């Protein structure tokens, strides 16, 4: 246990607290068990360490990584007991999905040690979703998405902007955000701005590693698939990345990937839960709702640039960005008239020359254009939607 404490204190000293993610203020840290899920690289570890550094007494806290060799022959529930004996009130467990039967032991910790609060995180959203249901009413779960364009501007360019809701955006309120050359920053963000490690010189390599680990390790292990399935899932992502906004034909897609048609919807759900794609349903249901899946996108634009290998469809990038940013605060659906609907509003996404035809029959329609800085009537800049969280 001493080595765990040494590692924890070192990580805490190295944690920067100058920038806090959007989720930081939304988490109710007073709950006895808090879970933070999200894709690899989204910043879950930093979020937990920042909370310890800013809001808690470090000597009353123990942070551990469940992938540590210590857990090869030690149990979480036993560690919790030792921690309580040392006067520790908070146990933070990172990468908890690496620990077998973690949800069962968290139940025991909850029942045995009422004086201990637990915060855990995991990158395998698949496993965390299952574990959260096992924990029933004991754990309060939160999802951490990657950086919004607004967060990117603050984290890497020192521009602190307010959050603008969809109501604010259609009312042109982002015009108050005086940003010089926003389209330059926006182009940077689309290529390499969604993950907090985007300024690393090895960003592209790290992103490819995240994709490989997710598809070749996380999903096959969770779903008890053969390792060869990981390569087929990578082929699936490459097909989506190079496509125009992708309307799935399950039979054709299964043929291209090399899997059974009947298994294809399940594989897509796995890949979505792992943070690699987003499925857009029609307006009889939301994302992953009861409606038919109308389109499939990669989860974020950085993945498009990383996986399309230079064969970039700009329309795909634009729609991917819009869905990726607006889904955090809204239920987004496919529109029968245009591209997307959010509540009663219809949004058509396109380039600078995009016309109004698709929204003529809409009750309340907007054209969302790339490559423009300012709004005009119901024409809105695409980059504004990156200020929504």
Image (cartoon, grey):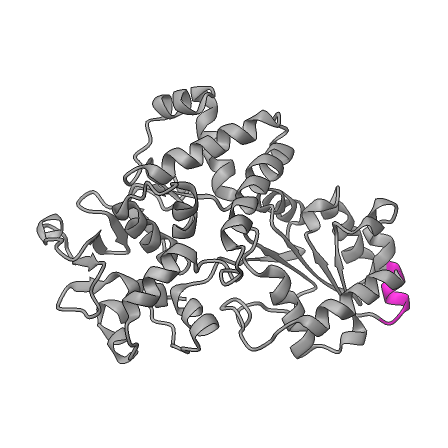
Quadrant assignment for the C terminus: bottom left
Q: Residue at x 46, y 62 (%)?
A: 147
Q: Quadrant of residue 126?
A: top right
Q: Quadrant of residue 73?
A: top right
Query: 106 or 86: nearer the eye?
Result: 86
Q: Residue at x 26, y 51 (%)?
A: 341
Res 324 seen here? yes
- Horizontal arrangement in the rendering, residue 97 relative to residue 240 (left or right): right
The main secondary structure of the magenta stretch is helix
- Horizontal arrangement in the rendering, residue 55 relative to residue 371 (left or right): right
Instruction: Verify whether residue 283 appears in magenta.
Output: no
Q: Quadrant of residue 110?
A: bottom right
Q: Position of residue 270 (x, y in %)?
A: 52, 37
Q: Please provide the residue range marked out in magenta.
A: 81-87
Query: 210 or 122: nearer the eye?
Result: 210
Q: Residue at x 81, y 52 (%)?
A: 76
Q: Given the current orientation, which residue lies at the most extreme front position? A: 201
In the rendered view, would you say 351 is above or below 229? Answer: below
Number of numbered discs: 0
Q: Residue at x 67, y 56 (%)?
A: 138
Instruction: Verify whether residue 83 appears in magenta.
Output: yes
């Amino acid at each position: 246990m001493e080595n765990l404490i040494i590692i924890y204190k070192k990580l805490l000293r190295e944690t920067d607290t100058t920038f806090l993610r959007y989720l930081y203020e939304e988490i109710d840290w007073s709950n006895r068990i808090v879970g933070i899920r999200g894709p690899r690289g989204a910043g879950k570890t930093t979020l937990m360490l920042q909370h310890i550094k800013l809001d808690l007494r470090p000597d009353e806290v123990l942070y551990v990584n469940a992938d540590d060799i210590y857990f090869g022959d030690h149990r979480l529930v036993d560690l919790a007991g030792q921690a309580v004996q040392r006067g520790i009130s908070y146990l933070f467990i990172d990468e908890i999905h690496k620990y077998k039967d973690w949800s069962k032991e968290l139940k025991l910790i909850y029942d045995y040690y009422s004086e201990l609060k637990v915060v855990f995180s995991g990158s395998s959203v698949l496993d965390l979703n299952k574990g959260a249901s096992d924990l029933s009413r004991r754990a309060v779960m939160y999802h951490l998405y990657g950086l919004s364009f607004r967060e990117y501007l603050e984290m890497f360019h020192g521009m602190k902007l307010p959050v603008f809701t969809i109501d604010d955006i259609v009312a042109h309120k982002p015009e108050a955000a005086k940003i010089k050359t926003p389209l330059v920053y926006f182009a940077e963000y689309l290529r390499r701005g969604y993950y907090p490690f985007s300024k690393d010189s090895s960003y592209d390599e790290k992103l490819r590693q995240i994709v490989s680990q997710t598809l070749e390790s996380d999903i096959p292990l969770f779903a008890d698939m053969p390792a060869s399935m990981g390569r087929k899932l990578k082929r699936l992502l490459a097909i989506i990345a190079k496509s125009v906004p992708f309307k799935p034909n399950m039979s054709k897609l299964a043929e291209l990937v090399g899997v059974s048609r009947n298994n294809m919807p399940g594989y897509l759900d796995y890949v979505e839960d792992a943070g690699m794609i987003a499925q857009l349903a029609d307006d009889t249901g939301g994302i992953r709702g009861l409606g038919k899946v109308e389109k499939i996108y990669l989860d974020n634009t950085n993945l498009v640039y990383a996986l399309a290998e230079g064969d970039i469809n700009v329309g795909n990038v634009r729609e991917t960005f819009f869905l990726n940013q607006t889904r955090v605060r809204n239920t987004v659906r496919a529109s029968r008239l245009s591209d997307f609907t959010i509540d009663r509003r219809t949004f058509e996404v396109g380039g600078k020359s995009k016309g109004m035809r698709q929204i003529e029959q809409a009750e309340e329609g907007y054209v969302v254009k790339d490559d423009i800085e300012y709004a005009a009537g119901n024409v809105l800049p695409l980059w504004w939607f990156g200020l929504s969280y």
